[in-house]
Image (cartoon, grey):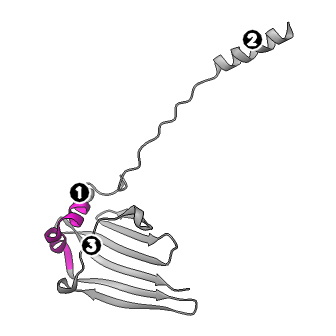
């Protein structure tokens, strides 16, 4: 008799449990917090070489930083159109991670290798109401 009561109690308590539904949202390719229109611009920037060249503010300002255990050396850089190497779309399988920080009409993108030894920072800003690349910097650690 005790076994039957015990089984009935377990079944009853199991039936009374509240079901919880967990919703899993797909992670967007780019953060939904990015300004409207930036995602389309970003895709076109990496797929159309003419569009890319038209949306870089040359001479493009930037820095190149090298760090080791003893010192950090930062050099100001200026990139010109004649020497620009076209940027290709981000490849998550290449061993880099990427993050975006949006502040109004400024988007800061950071890409870093999985070991944290090489970082690229690109800054995107609105110039004459259209997005453009306004800064390009690199940091390399050698320790």
Residue 86, percent across and down? 23, 75
The image quarter containing residue 45 is bottom left
Residue 87 in the image, given as x and y percentages of width and height: 27, 72
Give, as a single range, the part of the protein colored magenta: 41-57
Estimate how packed mark 3 is, as few (under 14), some (14 to 19) or many (20 or more) residues with alpha carbons within 10 Å.
few
Q: Where the C terminus falls, by quadrant?
A: bottom right
Image check: 38 left or right of 91? left
Counting from the top left corner in percent of width and height, residue 134 is at 26, 76
Instruction: Find numbered disc 1 in the image and state the secondary structure of the residue it sits on.
Output: helix
Q: Which mark is residue 40?
A: 1
Image quarter in which the N terminus is found:
top right
The Cα–Cα distance between marks 1 and 3, rounded to whole angstroms, is 16 Å
Residue at 39% in and 81% down: 138
The residue indicated by pointer 2 is: 8
Q: Is residue 45 magenta?
A: yes
The residue singled out by tag 3 in the image is 87
Report how far apart the C-alphas of labels 2 and 3 lie in the structure: 67 Å
Report the residue that reaches farthest toward the right: 2
N-terminal-most mark, 2 or 1? 2
Which is closer to the viewer, label 1 or label 3? 3
Q: Residue at x 64, y 22 (%)?
A: 17
């Amino acid at each position: 008799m005790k076994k039957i009561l015990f089984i009935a109690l377990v079944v009853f308590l199991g039936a009374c449990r509240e079901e919880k539904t967990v919703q899993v949202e797909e992670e967007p390719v780019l953060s939904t917090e990015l300004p409207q229109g930036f995602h389309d611009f970003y895709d076109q920037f990496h797929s159309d070489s003419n569009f890319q060249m038209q949306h870089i503010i040359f001479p493009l300002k930037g820095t190149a930083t090298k760090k080791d255990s003893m010192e950090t050396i930062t050099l100001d850089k200026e990139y010109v159109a004649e020497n620009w190497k076209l940027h290709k779309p981000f490849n998550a399988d290449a061993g880099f991670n990427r993050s975006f920080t949006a502040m109004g009409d400024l988007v800061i993108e950071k890409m870093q290798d999985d070991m944290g030894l090489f970082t690229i920072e690109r800054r995107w800003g609105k110039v004459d109401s259209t997005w453009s690349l306004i800064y390009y910097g690199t940091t390399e650690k050698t320790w």
